[in-house]
Amino acid sequence: MAHHFTAYEVEELLPELKASLGLRRFIDEEGNEVQKVPLGPEPLMRMYITMVRARILDEWLLRLQRVGKVALHAPNVGQEAAAAGSAMALREEDWLFPSYRELAAYIARGMNEEEILDRAMANIDDPLRGSEFVVYGHRKYNIVPAPVPVGSQVPLAVGAAMAAKILGHSVVTMAIFGDGATSRADFHAGLNFAGVFRAPVVFVIQNNAWAISMPSRRQTAAKTFALKGVAYGVPGVRVDGNDVIAVYTTASEAVERARAGEGPTLLEAVTYRLGPHTTADDPDRYRPREEAKAMEKFDPIRRLGKYLKARGIISEKEEREIWSEWGERIERIVKRCYEKPPLPPSVVLENVYSEPTWNLEEQMRELEESLEVMKELGIGVE
Amino acid sequence: MPVTNMVQALNSALREEMRRDKRVVVLGEDVGKRGGVFLVTEGLIDEFGPERVIDTPLTEAGIVGVAIGMALYGLKPVAEIQFIDFIYEAFDQIATNLSKIRRRSGGMFSAPVVIRGPCCGGVKGGMFHSQSNEAYFVHTAGLKVVMPSRPYDAKGLLKASIRGEDPVIFLEPKVLYRAIKEEVPEEDYVVPIGEARVVQEGSDVTIVTWGAMVYKALEVSKIARSRHGWEAEVIDLRTLFPFDKDAIIRSLEKTGRLVIVHEAPKTLGLGAEIAAYVAENAIELLKAPVARVTGFDAPFPLAHEKLYMPNEARIYMALSRVMSY
């Protein structure tokens, strides 16, 4: 006999629906407090500096890509609040499964500029050993390197969360991905598992309005992305993704809910991709310049800066100093990383299995011989 | 005849087929206003509208699954996979439905979908913008697999694929998109599926290859000629399945030596099937063991792709080996 839901049961869903249709924010784009900010100066400054570092590094990565030192870059510009705010909600022992546009999230997890730049330049100290471009990750920080095909990390985050639960660890996992990724099968499979197994996982959708040339309305006919959680039994919350306080506060609540055994949350951070999809993209082909220009006033760093000044946490002079100090610091790191030698040729056959199989040993000999023959024929290795 | 590159040749093949046959539709990520990330579908939406040039949500499983449904109903969909490295989400649809629906339905239904997309390396694209994954599709009965190496073939083979009755995986070496320009006829023509092309005649050794490796093979054949006087015959397979076995045997009757060059990894690459075919059917023609020069059995790297892919040195090493056997 089919079950008729009682009015009470239907009513129970209403707060969830409201949260997934709302837009939670604490400060508006001019930095005015629209809701009591529950944070003191320390976490607010940490957020600000994390975003400043990401922005400065982002500009360097663009420049380094242009001179051919970095193969590809996916700018995080304009989305720093969504990335930093969500990753900062995690504890050290938690795990992050990012996508390829989360510069501020890696910094929030403790990755430093040198590790990021070594990775981007695929030099001798690249922690990922020249395997791929545009993605970052590190065992030390529990950041699993993103797959370039978007969204395929979503079930991985769920599986890791289930494993932590099975092993009795008080560990939460977080997956960050874009609105485009919600169209892929893995997103749906991952959310479904998370709901069924009440996995301690937080899903963060960075709804940055564009998946390359496709506006987010081409990814879903639903009113919001957060609403998608409801059908999987996963509460959805929609926040102003350019208000780092809203992202951090909401993500923290979700992380603690997960840690307390109350299951997963789907967080939609509404933000905007100010730059191109990647350095290989030309947004002028599909997006009016005026649109991106008009969105600059929602810049999350400018917004938090205004709030910090209005609350008297920093002065205008201190704000300038933060930028110039980090600017100089990062420039020194860029110069150091720039001079590092490339990876050795043998990396192409590394890390395929735990131990090289016989075919790889054979192919290593072929590679070594080919280096000699290249010299003989006058062919360069680059 | 206008001189065009491969992107323009593919674009005109799509445009002409869409004009010729109202059932031809194009679907994929960013194929409309953006014109595809490599501009293969540029301008099609202006001529044919959003009903026939469909910007889809970001899901390869959806793109291919929906294309199969469209084909079952009678359309001729050409589905773009933005990079062929992203096709794996759709692999279930390809292995379960696309390749088997004819057999599964006793021949009553078929899904002549063309799935096309940029493949292969050489553009410093890293692990997921460089793969040569043709072997998965060759291994899946029910699919035809094509890879052109020049604009003329790209246009003619794409037209033949669209007009055919079977599903086709159409692989476009992205490094050649703008690198090769040649005269391509404006009048209608097709390049039949299943026919290889002898790019260069030679009497000492046969190099069977496809895609961008055709040019590497030609380069090495020059080195071999000037250093040793060896004459290499270079065969561009063009259709990877059903491959032109007769063209290979005809060449071996002249040369008796076979070097196979492909970008895809060695183990169970298409080179293994070609070598096995020759061993089973024409071993008496061989004067030396078959040699393969391939991508290594490792994921495609960002660093040192030139060393990972077959390069002139490794092809030269293989030629020297079979010639001095």
Image: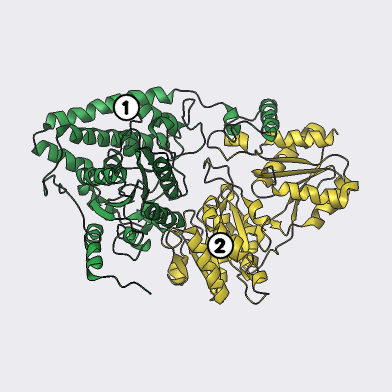
Q: Which chain is green?
A: A
Q: Is residue B155 visible?
A: no
Where does label 2 land, which residue?
B93
Judging from the image, what secondary structure is the residue with disc 1 in? helix
Residue B291 position, x and y percent, is: 77, 40
Residue at 29% x, 37% y is A55
Where does label 1 land, which residue?
A330
Q: Is residue A135 left or right of residue B96?
A: left
Residue at 83% x, 36% y is B323
Residue A341 position, x and y percent, is: 49, 23
Q: Is residue B166 visible?
A: yes
Q: Is residue B94 left or right of residue A134?
A: right
> Which residue, as the protein is rendered here, is positioned at the far front?
A1
Relative to B143, say whether B102 is above or below. Answer: below
Judging from the image, what secondary structure is the residue with disc 2 in? helix
> How far is disc 2 from disc 1 in space, using C-alphas?
47 Å
